[in-house]
Image (tube, rainbow, N blue to C red):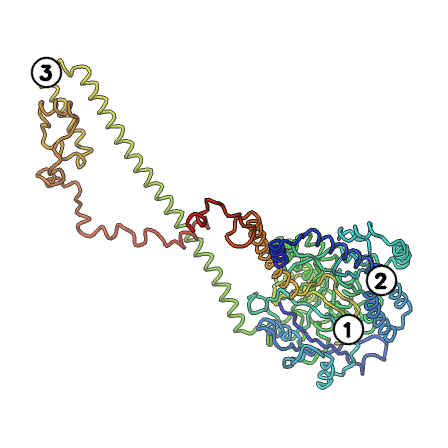
Amino acid sequence: MAAVYKALSKTANDKDDAPINGVKRNKQRVLILTSRGVTYRHRHLLKDLASMMPHGRVDAKYDQKKRLGELNELAELYNLFVSLKLAKVKFLVSNIHTMEELAFSGNCLKGSRPILSFDKAFDSEPHLQVIKQLFLQIMGVPPLQKRSKPFIDHVLSFSVADGRIFMRVYQVQETEPSKKDGAEEEEAAEEAKKSKSKHAEKHKELDVSLLEIGPRCVLQPIIIQEGSFGGALLYENKHFVSPNQVRADLRRKSASKNNSRAEQSINRHSKMGNLGLRSDGGNQKPMDQLDSRELFA
Amino acid sequence: MGRSQLKTALKAEKGIDLKKLKEKRRLKERTKAKTKRTGSRGGAKIPEDDSDVDEDQEEDDGGAADSEEDDSADEEDAPAIDLAALDESSDDSSVDFEEKIERPKKPKQTKTTDTVPTPKATKKTAEVEHRDEDDEEEEEEEEEEIDWADLPPEEREDLVPRTRISINNTTGLLNTLKRFAIATDDSTTFASHQSLASQEPTADVIGEDLMDDIKRELAFYAQALDAAKRGRTLLKAEGVPFSRPTDYFAEMVKDDGHMEKVKAKLIEEASAKKASAEARKLRDLKKFGKQVQVAKLQERQKAKRETLEKIKTLKRKRSETGGGDLGTHEADLFDVGVDNELNKYNKGLQRGGERGAGGPGAKRQKKNEKFGFGGKKKYSKSGDAASSADLSGFSVKRMKGGAKGKTPKTARLGKSRRKAGAGKR
């Protein structure tokens, strides 16, 4: 899997939020783009993600993989009120499955705000805390976003396992509970009549279940930098092995097999030469009187 | 490696003494290594590069965060790194910049540090270690698990795990976090961020085996479900509309075409399952039917064998008791009866030799006894009156075209399908 530069330059709107009560308001927009040379799968994953991010702006592929700092200017161009205070996290994205190929039966409103479910492990270590905030601000749809829908019908879940972050998307389904015990039902109905707040009661009764929507992917953090696309290195994943390295190792392993075989054959040849068993080179047997060359000379 | 062997072979041919050469080389190497070690102790070159990197980082940190703790921690880190590099660079070609020296994970390197400790170095590291214990501990925790999930498990063992310069600037991370974090605690409403942390780490729920798909997905599902339930109650409490009314229509993430495809796929899957189950049932039935048929045939065969045996014993008894004494007439009479019985079973088989009802004459019998049974071979296969009168092989049904229906179209499936069937069983 090629590493996808999910060049997610996150921008927090500075103008209204910072000063008043010291509490930052959740109001941001996201620029979504890929580098050149990604495969269809990466493109589809990005499309899926973008469809769930009404606060995102999808842009054309970025031409180069270096000098990503220029993306900041690009974001400014789009009037995204750049105050780039954010850290940058680079991930290796693996095990990508897009919505299309997964064929899950879940579905949700385009642009509804998700409930973000984080693993508890996110609070344990600083770099995970940073990643959590990043996800919170990038994947979470800010309230009162223009294009967002008013109801909530899906959950975005991030879990940490084995040093990787697993992302899953589920639809929230509210269904009538199966009628197991009639007595309780009746009681509940009576209560509902009494309280006259039928709506509230009704909703409480509903069962919640989930249906997966897709896409799925696994993220392995590689580095965390202080600024967006630049700045000091704050964290580097020690366990990260670049896929190129893995590939090279495998190749080298197979090559070593061949090398050892070649060595063996050379050994054998030299040994035979030493024993005088080769017709050319090595220790030659002294010519015998009964040798055919001598006899029929 | 191959090349060197070739060279040795060549030299052997030329007659150069290899051992002497090798010894010389070894001596040279030893002296070189010694000089290297002493040089690196004096003013190491490799560690200098590393410390440069660290200094850069420190500058950045200072500019951004101005935290004194941070800087001091980094300064302490730097010498530790140098020392580690010093120790290991002498005997390992791949220089490993680790902050820590004693590690449980890599026995090879710990050995080297144990056996070849420079007294000065150990002293210093000890000092450093007790100074920044917290950092060290964190490092250790991280290092416990080296994972290679992208590889198939059998290949993972062979590859040497690489560990590199590890940077985990916790204070810096916390500072950046402070700069851009959105409050998710009680100070704000839940609706402003809509994020929830799970009750317990999901990794614990999954357990050891991450490759167990069902268990893993279940853990994720449980985490999400818990969040959904709690989030719903919280949102309800804050008066935010949660569930979509049935008459609210809007664009969905997956459009109708996509959902149609999904549905088609589900239906296809279900129907395929059903079809395969049915096919298997049929196959089983067929197998059972065949068994019944085979059993019947065997039974028939058995019955036949038994009757034949009975006849044989009867015949023998007859010949023993009254073969010679009784008149030929009676014996003949009886023999005829037996022959008839026999003929009923092997009609077609015995032709030629015992042609005709009477059988061979006495002289012929004597001759047969004397010279062994020979008999006439000529015309043995040609038809005669008896054979043409025999209609046992004839059936009206077959003649009328029943045979076609009897042999099934594909009595034997193709090889691939047979194999597939065998796999399923």
Does the image show residue B179?
Answer: yes
Q: What residue is pinned by disc 3? A: B327
In which image quadrant can residue B348 be found? top left
Q: Position of residue B263 (x, y in %)?
A: 51, 66
Amino acid bearing label 2: Gly
Quick check: A26 left or right of B365? Answer: right
Callout 2: SS: helix
Residue B123, position as x, y percentages in the image: 90, 55
User: What mark, if any, has residue B39 been given in the picture?
Assistant: 2
Indicate the secondary structure of the residue bearing disc 3.
loop
Q: Quadrant of residue B59?
A: bottom right
Q: Please state which of residues A141 and A165 is positioned toward the viewer in this rendering.
A: A165
Between marks 2 and 3 in the image, the one whose residue lies nearer the viewer: 2
Q: Which residue is mark 1?
A: A87
Residue A159: image location, x then y, percent: 70, 62
State the image quarter where residue B295 is shown: top left
| Residue A274 image point, x, y percent | 58, 49
The Cα–Cα distance between marks 3 and 1, rounded to whole angstroms, is 124 Å
In the shown orientation, is residue A199 left or right of residue B322?
right
Are there few (<14), some (14-19), or many (20+) residues within 10 Å of tag 3?
A: few
User: CA–CA distance between discs 2 and 1?
Assistant: 41 Å
Q: Mark 1: give few (<14), some (14-19) or many (20+) Cα within 10 Å.
A: many
Position of B322 with respect to B181 (left or right) is left
Label 2 to label 3: alpha-carbon separation: 128 Å
